[in-house]
Each structure stands twice: as structure tokens, then as C-alpha cells.
């Protein structure tokens, strides 16, 4: 798209040295048979590089935030937000000296307020920045806290006074659209975690998500296989409702790691619905320990944060 826009500008003669009009693709200026074609090719490549470099925004770190982790999924309904919330809590539990924040970037379906049991409007700092709401020691910001008119400020994450954070966990909306690209291009992201069920249809979109982050030069730390297995609470029989090891197969194809598995369990859903995520309300449960293990794998793959 950027290249096409540049071509239109070139046709209008907006760049120094550009021809005032094109005689057609068969003209000497663009014919592969022309003796000067190599010169024109070099000119095109140089100008395209200039436009591309101008078109990408300069990344601006979020003041006070050392590392940004994004949790993404190619499609909705795979438990991405539940995973992001529990991993944010697990990061704080993993090292009590670390300060953790949680940003809900899903402006159409914000779920962080309910999962984190938070209500109310953010206060403004003297610098007119929003102060996150806090619960369980986690600083949270979400579209769900804001009136409709102020929704755009959430998209950038830069209008929030986060204080000093070691980790900012961003719960991305599903898909690979403008929000994902805007965040990836405007702020330095330390790493991305892709969440998917083992279901084939979910894996198709998870792959798109992983490839999108690679194209914008965001390191993909690995994949989380969510809802990996269901164990009957009565007979203990295990059923792979969404398929078995689909995320592992995808990870091998992409050359990525599987950070861990989260089972399909009613307690995970009930605790998040009640605003008491399982990592904080049932820390000794097998499900909470699964989130903690994944957190350990994430931390292992992070670069040394700035001092």
C-alpha cells in the first residue's frame, strides 16, 4: 500500500527527479529492454526505502515500564484474556519484588475489569495522565473503566501514569488488525505470547498471529496450549475435546517453543467470572501451578531488562 501511494506521488512529480508524467509501462523509462532500466530500478528502490522509513512511526518507550509482554491469539474464544490475567498475577507471585501492570487493549470486549474485580473511573495525575486501578497488587487499565468519548487514549498505552513497572502485560484483541500493528510499531515490545486451543481452526489463526509479530520484528517467546485436556471430575477420564497436541505441532512448524499447557477446567472459568483468578484464589491448585510454570518459561526467555 505504501509503495502504491509512492507510485501515485511519483506520477504527480512530487519527488525531486521524478518524471512529470508516465508514458506507459511500455515506455523507455520502464521497459526492461531499456539501457537505463538498471538506473531506474535503483531509483525506485531508493525512493521506496525512503517512503517506508518515513511511514513507520518511531517507537517510544512507555515511561517507567521496563518490559512489555503482549498476549495475543488469532481468534477469539481461546482463553487469551484468562491466560493474560493469570500470567500477570503469576509474574507478581514468581518474584514479589517485581511490579506488574495489565493493559486491556480490547476496546470492543474488555474483560479485565470483571476478571480483576475492578470498577470505577481512573483518577488523573497532575500531568493529566490516567492512574491505573489496582487489585491483587496489579495496576490495571481497561476500556471498561472509561466513558465512550475517551476510548482512543487506551489504544496507545502512553496516556497512563504506570509509575514504575517491571512488566506490563497487554491483553490484545483477537486477530491481526490495526490495534496489534499500532502497539507493535509505536512501543518497544519485549516479547509476544500466542495463546491457542489445539483445535485446527484456532491454529490457522494462531499461525497468522505468530507470523505477524515476526514481520514487525517482535520476538515470539512461545505458544500456550490452552484447554488442552478435560478431566472428568467423577471418573477422572481425560478427553481432548479440542484435539491433542495441535499447538505442539504448530510450534514445530514455526520453530517456536511451547511454553506449557492449561487444562480445560471449570475452576478456571468460575474464578475469573467471580473476579478472583485461580492463581490468586487457589494458588496450590494444579491449574494455578500450570500458569506458574508457564510464567517461569516466559521469564527465562526475556532479555536482561534495562537498569
Image (cartoon, rainbow, N blue to C red):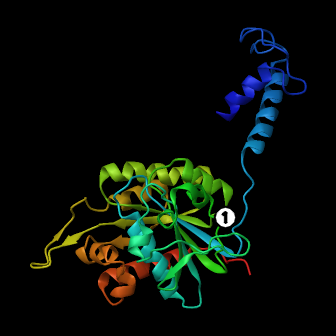
- Which residue is nearer to you in this view: 56 or 141? 141
Q: Which residue is depicted at the point 35% across and 71% down?
A: 261
Q: What x and y, as percent, mark residue 163?
A: 66, 79
Q: Which residue is depicted at the point 50% across and 60% down?
A: 172
Q: What x and y, as percent, mark residue 252?
A: 43, 58
- For mark 1, give the secondary structure: loop
Q: What x and y, as percent, mark residue 300?
A: 55, 78
Q: Is residue 43 left or right of residue 164?
A: right
Q: Is residue 259 visible?
A: no
Q: Is residue 46 visible?
A: yes
Quadrant of res 28? top right
Q: Which residue is mark 1?
A: 158
- Which residue is nearer to you in this view: 73 or 114? 114
- Relative to 147, say whether 304 is above or below: below
Q: Which residue is depicted at the point 50% across and 62% down?
A: 143
Within-10-Å neighbours for mark 1: few <14, some 14–19, many 20+:
some
- Relative to 41, say whether 144 is above or below: below
Q: Is residue 147 left or right of residue 185?
A: left
Q: What x and y, as percent, mark residue 76?
A: 37, 55
**Image quadrant for the N terminus?**
top right
Amino acid at each position: 500500500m505504501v509503495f502504491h501511494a509512492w507510485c501515485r506521488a511519483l506520477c504527480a512529480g512530487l519527488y525531486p527527479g521524478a518524471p512529470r508524467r508516465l508514458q506507459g509501462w511500455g515506455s523507455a523509462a520502464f521497459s526492461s529492454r531499456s539501457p537505463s532500466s538498471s538506473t531506474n530500478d535503483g531509483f525506485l528502490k531508493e525512493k521506496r526505502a525512503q517512503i517506508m522509513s518515513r511511514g513507520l512511526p518511531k517507537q517510544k518507550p512507555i515511561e517507567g515500564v521496563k518490559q512489555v509482554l503482549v498476549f495475543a491469539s488469532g481468534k477469539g474464544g481461546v482463553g487469551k484474556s484468562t491466560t493474560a490475567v493469570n500470567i500477570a498475577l503469576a509474574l507478581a507471585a514468581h518474584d514479589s519484588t517485581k511490579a506488574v501492570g495489565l493493559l486491556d487493549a480490547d476496546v470492543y470486549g474488555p474483560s479485565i475489569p470483571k476478571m480483576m474485580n475492578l470498577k470505577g473511573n481512573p483518577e488523573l495525575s497532575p500531568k493529566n495522565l490516567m492512574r491505573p486501578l489496582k487489585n491483587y497488587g496489579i495496576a490495571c487499565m481497561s476500556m471498561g473503566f472509561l466513558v465512550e468519548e475517551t476510548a482512543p487514549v487506551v489504544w496507545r498505552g502512553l496516556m497512563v501514569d504506570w509509575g514504575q513497572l517491571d512488566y506490563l502485560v497487554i491483553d490484545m484483541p483477537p486477530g491481526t488488525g490495526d490495534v496489534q500493528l499500532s502497539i507493535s510499531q509505536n512501543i518497544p515490545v519485549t516479547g509476544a505470547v500466542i495463546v491457542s486451543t489445539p483445535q485446527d481452526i484456532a491454529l490457522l489463526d494462531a499461525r497468522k498471529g505468530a507470523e505477524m509479530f515476526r514481520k514487525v520484528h517482535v520476538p515470539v517467546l512461545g505458544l500456550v496450549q490452552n484447554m488442552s485436556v478435560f478431566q472428568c471430575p467423577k471418573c477422572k477420564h481425560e478427553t481432548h475435546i479440542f484435539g491433542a497436541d495441535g499447538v505442539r505441532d504448530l510450534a514445530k512448524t514455526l520453530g517456536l517453543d511451547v511454553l506449557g499447557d492449561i487444562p480445560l477446567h471449570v475452576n478456571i472459568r468460575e474464578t475469573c467470572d467471580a473476579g478472583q483468578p485461580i492463581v490468586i484464589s487457589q494458588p496450590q491448585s494444579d491449574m494455578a501451578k500450570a500458569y506458574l510454570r508457564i510464567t517461569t518459561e516466559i521469564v527465562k526467555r526475556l532479555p536482561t531488562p534495562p537498569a
